[in-house]
Image (spheres, grey):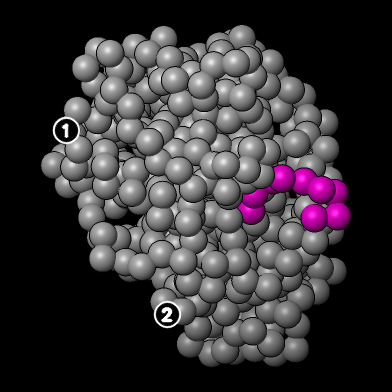
Amino acid sequence: MTKEQIRNRRTKIVATLGPASSNHQVIGDLISSGVNVFRLNFSHGSQDQHRETANIVRETASEHKRHVGILGDLQGPKIRIGELQTSEKILEQDQPIILTTDADSSDSESDRIHVSYSPLPNSVFSGDTLLLDDGLIRLKVSSVNGNDVHCTVTQPGILKSRKGLNRLGGGLSADAITEKDLSDLKVIIDLDLEYVAVSFPACGSDLDPVKCALTAANSDAKIIAKIERAEVVANEDNIKELIDAADGVMVARGDLGVEIGDSELISIQKRIIRLCRQANKPVITATQMMESMIHNPVPTRAEVFDVANAVLDGTDAVMLSAETATGKFPSKVVKAMAETALGAEKHPMMRQSSYRVERMFSEIDESIAMSAMYAANHVTGVAAIICLTESGITPLLTSRLSSTLPIFGVSPLLSTCRRMSLYRGVIPIHYDVMKGKDDLFEKALSLIVERGAITKGQRVAITSGDLYGKGGSTNTLKILEYV
């Protein structure tokens, strides 16, 4: 993929790093193929491994002269079965199974399987459906007796140790932040990562321990809340509460699909993306987007359409998990996803939106951002938007409206540039327009002229603030013509 194609693509790509992709060469190939943000999955690997990988990402991105963000994804309280005493256990149709919280009573010869989630007997009832291994195996609860939950296999399969356990419809929950998460969070803070993803939050207050830790460490990392519990999507108010409490959201379709059913995910995904854009929060769509490319060099047409639909929904980013972490073709899958996003962005509905035109704004910076987009869509000759920014807020606000024009986020802060790498349609530029004696607007214009973004006779809309060095103070819009 050419640099021009990467620049012209508005939808960003998040790629998970793992055994297949954590070395300098592959990370460089992934950046060249179009990755904007790398995900470190703290459910796997050691802290030292993640430290080493993050350092490689920083070094490689610098070599490629690209601003790349890093997201640290906390494991969270995923409820799992315990260690089996054999490599695997075959569960057959109608087989009686006992899930027990008593580790000493399970063995390989019996139908007793240990579950590490101690509240399980008090959390399920006769008639409930339990889902193992992302729903590949289903059990029907027949009764509960002490530490034992008696079940019948209704969907057979091969079970392995440490596989996930869910209840259809949700309801199995534990504290969102574990001791392991707090330990991993210290690593994320120490590495100065741009984003931290919180797994399985049920409500806004579940994010508080992470917020407190970030504040205490004076960290600028932004919190991405992963929506993956049925109770969060039970109604729109619950979704809005979590969106409002976070800095951004991930539609984590794996566990969420298991709990509510895949058919319900379609409308839920669209609703979450719409609510995030209305709330000025970035949103990532994740899980099995090009799953077949773990083993195959090309995606299925169904996967291409899945990615394209997320783009048409307005997602800021689409995410790859095992496809790049353990798959055989990490660079090829990124290229396939990038080409799919570019194809979807050609649709007319991606060209322009005006759903906020009639809104009143209480914040000056938001009104300036919306004015810039209105000018971009209604003033002839405007070929780009430039946001001079400290915090990255104005480029984010600007990116909430659809347009075919590039949004250049120009910041003196490297951390802000890396953070803006997640925002749809925003191209980060690290530069301090205040240095030197040149007029800052003329200097901003020259920056993108040097990049070939505009030609003579074209115009740019530039936003800035009077209070240099203070984020969120944007109060000026100026339109310049390149002559």
Q: What residue type is labelled 1?
A: Thr
Helix, strand or loop at mark 1 = loop
Instruction: Residue at 68%, 79% (x, y): give it.
Output: 120
Q: In which quarter of the image is the N terminus?
A: top left
Residue 235: numbered disc: 2
Taking the image as drawn, is residue 26 in sight?
no
Task: Please name the amino acid that badge 2 sits on.
Answer: Asn
In which image quadrant can residue 270 be found?
Answer: bottom left
User: What is the crowding at mark 2: few (fewer than 14 residues within 10 Å), some, or many (at least 20)?
Assistant: few
Q: In which quarter of the image is residue 437?
A: top right
Q: Which of 168 and 191 is in front in this view?
A: 191
Q: Label 1, label 2: how many angstroms apart (C-alpha)?
A: 43 Å
Mark 1 vs 2: CB contact within 8 A: no
Residue 101 place in picture, x, y as percent: 76, 74
- Camera-side residue of 176 and 478: 478
- Depth check: 403 or 421 in front? 403
Magenta includes 460?
no
221 falls in the magenta region: yes
Of residues 64 and 444, the one drawn nearer to the viewer in this rendering: 444
Task: Estimate the x, y position of residue 290 in percent, counting from the top left.
Answer: 37, 37
Sequence-wise first label, 1 or 2: 2
The residue located at (44%, 38%) in the rendering is: 463
Give the percent coordinates (x, y) of residue 381: 19, 28
Provide the residue span drawn in magenta: 215-223
Residue located beneath label 1 in the image: 380
Secondary element at image label 2: loop
Instruction: From the viewer's perspective, tell me whether residue 362 is left or right of residue 115.
Output: left
Q: Could you tell me which residue is drawn at 40 percent across and 41 percent down?
A: 477
